[in-house]
Image (cartoon, helix red, strand yellow):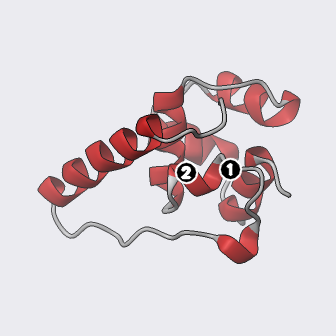
């Protein structure tokens, strides 16, 4: 069992939280508070975080899955591929009985 905040810290590796905040257009203080205090995020932000880290949102926020079960995403080759994948990720995430963020 692994919470999303621990997964994020592992996936960040040597990158600072400020990098992830910029990538997701989330105020750094908001993201830091969520990571440090386990405060939930807007689900759309959760999808953005997963995308920036290259993993599925479903895997990231499913506490029953750990790093051995990681679901990496293929990097899109075009802007159109990126938009299509983001829409699919969001639809899949919101249509699933995923845990609350």
- Asked whether disc 1 touches disc 2, contact meaning CB atoms under 8 Å apart, the reply is yes
Q: Residue at x 66, y 58 (%)?
A: 15
Q: Quadrant of the N terminus?
A: bottom right
Q: Is residue 46 left or right of residue 74?
A: right
Q: Residue at x 28, y 54 (%)?
A: 85
Q: How crowded is the residue under tag 2: few (<14 C-alpha within 10 Å), some, or many (20+)?
A: many
Measure the C-alpha gap from mark 1 to mark 2: 6 Å
Q: Secondary structure beneath disc 2?
A: helix
Residue 101, position as x, y percentages in the image: 65, 30
Residue 73, position as x, y percentages in the image: 43, 68
Residue ID for mark 1: 62
Reply above or below: 35 against 40. Answer: below
67 vs 34, nearest the viewer: 67
16 vs 53, nearest the viewer: 53
Residue 30, position as x, y percentages in the image: 67, 22
Q: How crowded is the residue under tag 1: few (<14 C-alpha within 10 Å), some, or many (20+)?
A: some
Dot label at residue 94: none
Reply above or below: 4 against 26. Answer: below
71 vs 30, nearest the viewer: 71
Q: Secondary structure beneath disc 1?
A: loop
Q: Residue at x 65, y 29 (%)?
A: 100
Residue ID for mark 2: 58
Rendered image quadrant of residue 21: top right
């Amino acid at each position: 069992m692994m919470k999303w905040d621990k997964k994020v810290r592992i996936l960040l590796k040597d990158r600072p939280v400020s990098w992830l905040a910029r990538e997701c257009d989330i105020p750094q203080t908001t993201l830091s508070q969520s990571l440090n205090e386990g405060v939930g995020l807007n689900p759309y932000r959760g999808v953005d975080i997963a995308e920036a880290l290259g993993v599925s949102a479903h895997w990231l926020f499913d506490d029953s899955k750990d790093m051995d079960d990681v679901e990496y995403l293929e990097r899109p080759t075009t802007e159109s591929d990126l938009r299509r994948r983001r829409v699919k990720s969001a639809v899949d995430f919101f249509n699933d009985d995923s845990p609350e963020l």
